[in-house]
Amino acid sequence: MQFRMHVKNQDKDWWEEMDKPTVTDLKTAKQTAKDIVQYYNATLYHGDKPRVLLGVEMGGAGKRQHQWRKMNLTTIIGRGGQFYDIVCCSDCGCKGKRFGVSDVKRDRAWRAKKWIVCPDREE
């Protein structure tokens, strides 16, 4: 089931969309979100900032979200020491880079508004 977690680090706060089949209610969603943030904070790389969980909501944004799949075997270290994974949507083929837990930045060829949501995915 889909849920959203509100997280922050030292600089800013944001919402992250999650889709976990094991989540069936708000209590499970809160525990899952807490576990995700704890795992992220336990595996920080040099320069990463720890995250704090601010809240959890059930349901997603109501849009067709991309189903990102990691394409590289190991995490890549980019210029400036930034860590990322190359990801591809398993439904439409949209490509991008994932920074952190779920912050995906679509590649230049996929930045048009049409690719914000997955055009090939049924709700």
Image (tube, rainbow, N blue to C red):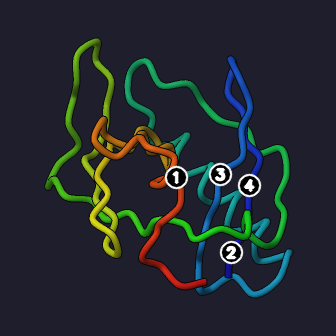
Which badge, 4 or 1, is on the more N-terminal residue?
A: 4
Dot 1 or dot 3, earlier in sequence: 3
Badge 1 crowding class, 10 Å Cα cut-off, few under 14, some 14 to 19, many 20 or more, is some
Kindly check if marks 4 and 3 are in contact, taking CB atoms under 8 A apart as contact. yes
Picture layout, residue 27 above or below residue 114: below
Q: Quadrant of the N terminus?
A: bottom right
- Determine the CA span between mark 1 and mark 3: 15 Å
Q: Toward the viewer: 84 or 88?
A: 88
Ranked by sequence position, the earlier of labels 1 and 2 is: 2
**Measuring 44% from the left and 43% from the top, which residue is drawn there?**
112
- The relative height of residue 71 versus residue 83 in the rendered view (above or below) is below
Q: Which residue is mark 2?
A: 2
Which type of secondary structure does the marked residue at label 4 adopt? strand
Distance in Å between CA atoms under marks 4 and 1: 19 Å
Residue sitting at 16 percent across and 53 percent down?
A: 72
The residue pinned by badge 4 equals 5
> Helix or strand or loop: what does disc 1 sit on?
loop
